[in-house]
Protein backbone atom coordinates (compact mmCIF):
# COMPACT_ATOMS: atom_id res chain seq x y z
CA UNK A 1 0.00 0.00 0.00
CA UNK A 2 2.81 2.38 0.97
CA UNK A 3 4.62 1.45 -2.23
CA UNK A 4 1.53 2.34 -4.21
CA UNK A 5 1.16 5.69 -2.43
CA UNK A 6 4.81 6.57 -3.07
CA UNK A 7 4.35 5.77 -6.74
CA UNK A 8 1.17 7.85 -6.85
CA UNK A 9 3.11 10.71 -5.24
CA UNK A 10 5.79 10.55 -7.92
CA UNK A 11 3.21 10.29 -10.68
CA UNK A 12 1.34 13.33 -9.36
CA UNK A 13 4.58 15.29 -9.01
CA UNK A 14 5.55 14.60 -12.61
CA UNK A 15 2.03 15.41 -13.82
CA UNK A 16 1.95 18.73 -11.96
CA UNK A 17 5.45 19.61 -13.16
CA UNK A 18 4.53 18.77 -16.76
CA UNK A 19 1.31 20.78 -16.60
CA UNK A 20 3.18 23.75 -15.06
CA UNK A 21 5.72 23.63 -17.88
CA UNK A 22 2.99 23.34 -20.52
CA UNK A 23 1.08 26.34 -19.19
CA UNK A 24 4.30 28.36 -18.96
CA UNK A 25 5.07 27.52 -22.59
CA UNK A 26 1.50 28.43 -23.57
CA UNK A 27 2.08 31.90 -22.12
CA UNK A 28 4.57 32.63 -24.88
CA UNK A 29 2.27 31.74 -27.77
CA UNK A 30 -1.21 32.88 -26.68
CA UNK A 31 -2.26 36.21 -28.09
CA UNK A 32 -4.96 37.52 -25.74
CA UNK A 33 -3.58 38.89 -22.43
CA UNK A 34 -6.52 37.34 -20.55
CA UNK A 35 -5.63 33.87 -21.86
CA UNK A 36 -2.00 34.45 -20.90
CA UNK A 37 -3.20 35.40 -17.41
CA UNK A 38 -5.26 32.21 -17.15
CA UNK A 39 -2.25 30.15 -18.30
CA UNK A 40 -0.12 31.85 -15.63
CA UNK A 41 -2.77 31.20 -12.97
CA UNK A 42 -2.87 27.52 -13.88
CA UNK A 43 0.94 27.37 -13.84
CA UNK A 44 0.93 28.87 -10.33
CA UNK A 45 -1.76 26.45 -9.12
CA UNK A 46 0.22 23.48 -10.47
CA UNK A 47 3.33 24.82 -8.76
CA UNK A 48 1.26 25.03 -5.57
CA UNK A 49 0.50 21.34 -6.05
CA UNK A 50 4.22 20.64 -6.46
CA UNK A 51 4.98 22.49 -3.19
CA UNK A 52 2.24 20.52 -1.47
CA UNK A 53 3.70 17.22 -2.70
CA UNK A 54 7.15 18.28 -1.47
CA UNK A 55 5.65 18.68 2.00
CA UNK A 56 5.93 22.48 2.00
CA UNK A 57 2.24 22.94 2.66
CA UNK A 58 2.44 26.47 3.97
CA UNK A 59 4.30 27.64 0.86
CA UNK A 60 1.61 25.94 -1.25
CA UNK A 61 -1.10 27.78 0.69
CA UNK A 62 0.64 31.12 0.33
CA UNK A 63 1.34 30.47 -3.34
CA UNK A 64 -2.39 30.14 -3.95
CA UNK A 65 -3.39 32.92 -1.52
CA UNK A 66 -0.84 35.57 -2.47
CA UNK A 67 0.05 34.82 -6.08
CA UNK A 68 -3.26 33.56 -7.44
CA UNK A 69 -5.47 35.34 -4.95
CA UNK A 70 -3.84 38.76 -4.87
CA UNK A 71 -1.26 39.31 -7.59
CA UNK A 72 -3.13 37.62 -10.43
CA UNK A 73 -6.52 39.06 -9.48
CA UNK A 74 -4.87 42.49 -9.60
CA UNK A 75 -3.39 41.58 -12.98
CA UNK A 76 -6.74 40.39 -14.39
CA UNK A 77 -8.31 43.60 -13.13
CA UNK A 78 -5.63 45.61 -14.94
CA UNK A 79 -6.22 43.62 -18.14
CA UNK A 80 -9.96 44.29 -17.96
CA UNK A 81 -9.27 47.97 -17.39
CA UNK A 82 -6.57 48.47 -20.01
CA UNK A 83 -7.13 45.98 -22.81
CA UNK A 84 -10.18 47.70 -24.35
CA UNK A 85 -8.11 50.89 -24.59
CA UNK A 86 -5.44 49.18 -26.64
CA UNK A 87 -5.81 50.49 -30.14
CA UNK A 88 -2.70 49.00 -31.67
CA UNK A 89 -3.91 45.49 -32.53
CA UNK A 90 -0.44 44.90 -33.89
CA UNK A 91 1.75 41.86 -34.02
CA UNK A 92 2.15 39.43 -31.18
CA UNK A 93 5.93 39.21 -31.17
CA UNK A 94 8.54 41.93 -31.18
CA UNK A 95 11.50 42.30 -33.51
CA UNK A 96 13.57 40.30 -31.07
CA UNK A 97 11.69 37.04 -31.71
CA UNK A 98 14.55 35.01 -33.20
CA UNK A 99 17.32 36.35 -30.93
CA UNK A 100 14.97 35.64 -28.02
CA UNK A 101 14.33 32.06 -29.12
CA UNK A 102 18.03 31.38 -29.70
CA UNK A 103 18.79 32.92 -26.30
CA UNK A 104 16.09 30.74 -24.70
CA UNK A 105 17.50 27.55 -26.14
CA UNK A 106 21.06 28.45 -25.11
CA UNK A 107 20.03 29.49 -21.59
CA UNK A 108 17.82 26.43 -21.05
CA UNK A 109 20.56 24.15 -22.30
CA UNK A 110 23.22 25.74 -20.11
CA UNK A 111 21.02 25.63 -17.01
CA UNK A 112 19.81 22.06 -17.65
CA UNK A 113 23.31 20.74 -18.31
CA UNK A 114 24.59 22.57 -15.24
CA UNK A 115 21.93 21.05 -13.02
CA UNK A 116 22.30 17.65 -14.60
CA UNK A 117 25.99 17.30 -13.98
CA UNK A 118 26.88 19.49 -11.02
CA UNK A 119 23.97 19.13 -8.62
CA UNK A 120 25.34 17.94 -5.28
CA UNK A 121 23.77 14.82 -3.87
CA UNK A 122 21.15 15.52 -1.23
CA UNK A 123 22.22 14.77 2.33
CA UNK A 124 20.20 11.67 3.04
CA UNK A 125 19.51 12.39 6.68
CA UNK A 126 18.07 15.83 6.18
CA UNK A 127 15.74 15.04 3.31
CA UNK A 128 13.45 12.82 5.33
CA UNK A 129 12.93 15.30 8.15
CA UNK A 130 9.51 16.84 8.34
CA UNK A 131 9.67 20.52 7.52
CA UNK A 132 6.73 22.06 9.28
CA UNK A 133 5.38 25.52 9.86
CA UNK A 134 6.48 25.54 13.51
CA UNK A 135 10.18 25.28 12.63
CA UNK A 136 9.72 27.73 9.81
CA UNK A 137 7.93 30.31 11.96
CA UNK A 138 10.50 30.06 14.72
CA UNK A 139 13.33 30.60 12.25
CA UNK A 140 11.43 33.36 10.48
CA UNK A 141 10.64 35.43 13.55
CA UNK A 142 13.82 34.83 15.55
CA UNK A 143 16.71 34.58 13.07
CA UNK A 144 15.23 36.52 10.17
CA UNK A 145 13.21 39.20 11.99
CA UNK A 146 15.25 41.97 10.37
CA UNK A 147 14.35 40.73 6.88
CA UNK A 148 10.73 40.48 7.95
CA UNK A 149 10.75 44.11 9.10
CA UNK A 150 12.55 45.19 5.93
CA UNK A 151 9.86 43.59 3.77
CA UNK A 152 7.18 45.50 5.66
CA UNK A 153 9.10 48.71 4.95
CA UNK A 154 9.32 47.65 1.29
CA UNK A 155 5.55 47.09 1.13
CA UNK A 156 4.92 50.46 2.75
CA UNK A 157 7.25 52.13 0.23
CA UNK A 158 5.41 50.36 -2.60
CA UNK A 159 2.03 51.64 -1.37
CA UNK A 160 3.34 55.19 -1.02
CA UNK A 161 4.97 55.05 -4.46
CA UNK A 162 1.77 53.72 -6.07
CA UNK A 163 -0.19 56.58 -4.48
CA UNK A 164 2.42 59.08 -5.66
CA UNK A 165 2.21 57.76 -9.24
CA UNK A 166 -1.58 58.05 -9.24
CA UNK A 167 -1.43 61.57 -7.72
CA UNK A 168 1.04 62.66 -10.40
CA UNK A 169 -1.32 61.30 -13.02
CA UNK A 170 -4.26 63.28 -11.66
CA UNK A 171 -2.24 66.49 -11.56
CA UNK A 172 -1.23 65.90 -15.17
CA UNK A 173 -4.90 65.47 -16.15
CA UNK A 174 -6.04 68.67 -14.44
CA UNK A 175 -3.09 70.80 -15.48
CA UNK B 1 15.81 11.10 -13.27
CA UNK B 2 15.90 12.24 -9.69
CA UNK B 3 12.96 14.22 -8.30
CA UNK B 4 15.16 17.12 -7.20
CA UNK B 5 16.93 17.24 -10.54
CA UNK B 6 13.61 17.25 -12.38
CA UNK B 7 12.29 20.12 -10.25
CA UNK B 8 15.49 22.14 -10.69
CA UNK B 9 15.34 21.66 -14.45
CA UNK B 10 11.67 22.73 -14.34
CA UNK B 11 12.64 25.82 -12.33
CA UNK B 12 15.38 26.68 -14.81
CA UNK B 13 13.04 26.25 -17.75
CA UNK B 14 10.32 28.38 -16.11
CA UNK B 15 12.91 31.12 -15.59
CA UNK B 16 14.14 30.81 -19.19
CA UNK B 17 10.58 30.84 -20.57
CA UNK B 18 9.76 33.93 -18.51
CA UNK B 19 12.89 35.73 -19.69
CA UNK B 20 12.10 34.85 -23.30
CA UNK B 21 8.56 36.11 -22.83
CA UNK B 22 9.88 39.44 -21.57
CA UNK B 23 12.13 39.68 -24.63
CA UNK B 24 9.85 38.50 -27.43
CA UNK B 25 6.35 39.68 -26.48
CA UNK B 26 5.12 43.19 -27.28
CA UNK B 27 2.21 43.58 -24.87
CA UNK B 28 3.28 45.28 -21.62
CA UNK B 29 0.87 43.31 -19.46
CA UNK B 30 2.06 40.02 -20.94
CA UNK B 31 5.66 41.09 -20.23
CA UNK B 32 4.72 41.77 -16.60
CA UNK B 33 3.18 38.33 -16.35
CA UNK B 34 6.33 36.77 -17.79
CA UNK B 35 8.29 38.54 -15.04
CA UNK B 36 6.00 36.87 -12.51
CA UNK B 37 6.80 33.57 -14.19
CA UNK B 38 10.52 34.22 -13.67
CA UNK B 39 9.90 34.86 -9.97
CA UNK B 40 7.95 31.60 -9.81
CA UNK B 41 10.86 29.71 -11.32
CA UNK B 42 13.21 31.12 -8.68
CA UNK B 43 10.67 30.26 -5.97
CA UNK B 44 10.45 26.67 -7.14
CA UNK B 45 14.23 26.37 -7.09
CA UNK B 46 14.45 27.78 -3.55
CA UNK B 47 11.59 25.60 -2.29
CA UNK B 48 13.19 22.48 -3.76
CA UNK B 49 16.49 23.24 -2.06
CA UNK B 50 14.69 24.01 1.21
CA UNK B 51 13.03 20.61 0.95
CA UNK B 52 16.24 18.81 -0.01
CA UNK B 53 18.45 20.35 2.63
CA UNK B 54 15.74 20.51 5.28
CA UNK B 55 16.66 24.11 6.11
CA UNK B 56 14.41 27.08 6.72
CA UNK B 57 16.52 29.57 4.73
CA UNK B 58 15.01 28.65 1.37
CA UNK B 59 11.46 28.87 2.69
CA UNK B 60 12.16 32.27 4.26
CA UNK B 61 13.53 33.53 0.94
CA UNK B 62 10.41 32.23 -0.83
CA UNK B 63 8.31 34.35 1.50
CA UNK B 64 10.46 37.41 0.88
CA UNK B 65 10.02 36.85 -2.88
CA UNK B 66 6.24 36.70 -2.39
CA UNK B 67 6.38 40.13 -0.78
CA UNK B 68 8.69 41.52 -3.45
CA UNK B 69 6.35 40.22 -6.16
CA UNK B 70 3.38 41.87 -4.49
CA UNK B 71 5.26 45.16 -4.17
CA UNK B 72 6.48 44.95 -7.76
CA UNK B 73 3.00 44.45 -9.13
CA UNK B 74 1.61 47.24 -6.93
CA UNK B 75 4.08 49.66 -8.54
CA UNK B 76 4.06 48.24 -12.07
CA UNK B 77 0.31 48.39 -12.64
CA UNK B 78 -0.05 52.15 -11.89
CA UNK B 79 3.00 52.84 -14.08
CA UNK B 80 1.48 50.85 -16.96
CA UNK B 81 -1.84 52.62 -16.36
CA UNK B 82 -0.07 55.97 -16.71
CA UNK B 83 1.74 54.92 -19.87
CA UNK B 84 -1.45 53.61 -21.49
CA UNK B 85 -3.28 56.81 -20.64
CA UNK B 86 -0.66 58.85 -22.47
CA UNK B 87 0.07 56.56 -25.41
CA UNK B 88 -3.32 54.83 -25.81
CA UNK B 89 -1.60 51.52 -26.49
CA UNK B 90 -0.11 48.52 -24.67
CA UNK B 91 2.51 48.00 -27.38
CA UNK B 92 6.01 48.22 -25.89
CA UNK B 93 7.53 49.59 -29.09
CA UNK B 94 5.56 52.81 -28.88
CA UNK B 95 7.23 53.54 -25.55
CA UNK B 96 10.63 53.77 -27.18
CA UNK B 97 10.97 57.45 -26.20
CA UNK B 98 11.57 56.17 -22.66
CA UNK B 99 15.06 55.20 -23.82
CA UNK B 100 16.05 58.83 -23.34
Image: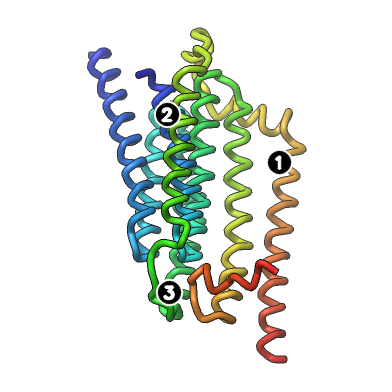
Q: Residue furthest bottom?
A: A175
Mark on residue B7? 2
Label 3, label 2: how many angstroms apart (C-alpha)? 35 Å
The secondary element bearing badge 3 is classed as helix
Q: Give the crowd class for mark 2: few <14, some 14-19, many >=20 residues within 10 Å.
A: many
Which residue is depicted at the point 36% across and 57% down?
A38
In the drawing, does residue B95 fall left or right of residue A43?
A: right
Q: Residue A158: x, y in percent? A: 69, 59
Mark 2 vs mark 1: give the one in front: 2
Label 2, label 1: how many angstroms apart (C-alpha)? 27 Å
The secondary element bearing badge 2 is classed as helix
Subunit bearing disc 1: A
Quarter of the image where the C terminus of chain A is located: bottom right
In the drawing, does residue B63 fall left or right of residue B100?
A: left
Circle 1 residue: A148
Circle 3 residue: A83
Which residue is depicted at the point 62% across and 35% down?
B61
Subunit bearing disc 3: A
Q: Is residue A67 above or below residue B63?
A: below
Q: Residue A54: x, y in percent? A: 42, 27
Q: Residue A93: x, y in percent? A: 41, 61
Q: Give the crowd class for mark 3: few <14, some 14-19, many >=20 residues within 10 Å.
A: some
The answer to whether dots 3 and 1 both sit on one chain is yes
Q: Nearer the viewer, residue A89 or A39?
A: A89
State how many labels appear.
3
Amino acid sequence: MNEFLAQLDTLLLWTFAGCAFASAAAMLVLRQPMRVAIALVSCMVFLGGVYGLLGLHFIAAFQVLIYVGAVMVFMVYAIMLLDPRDESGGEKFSKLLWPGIIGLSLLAEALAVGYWSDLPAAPRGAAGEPFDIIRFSQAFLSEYWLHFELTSVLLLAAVVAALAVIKENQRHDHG
Amino acid sequence: MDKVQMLQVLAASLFALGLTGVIIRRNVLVMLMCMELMLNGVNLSLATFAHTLGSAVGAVLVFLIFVVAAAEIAIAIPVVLLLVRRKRTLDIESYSDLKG
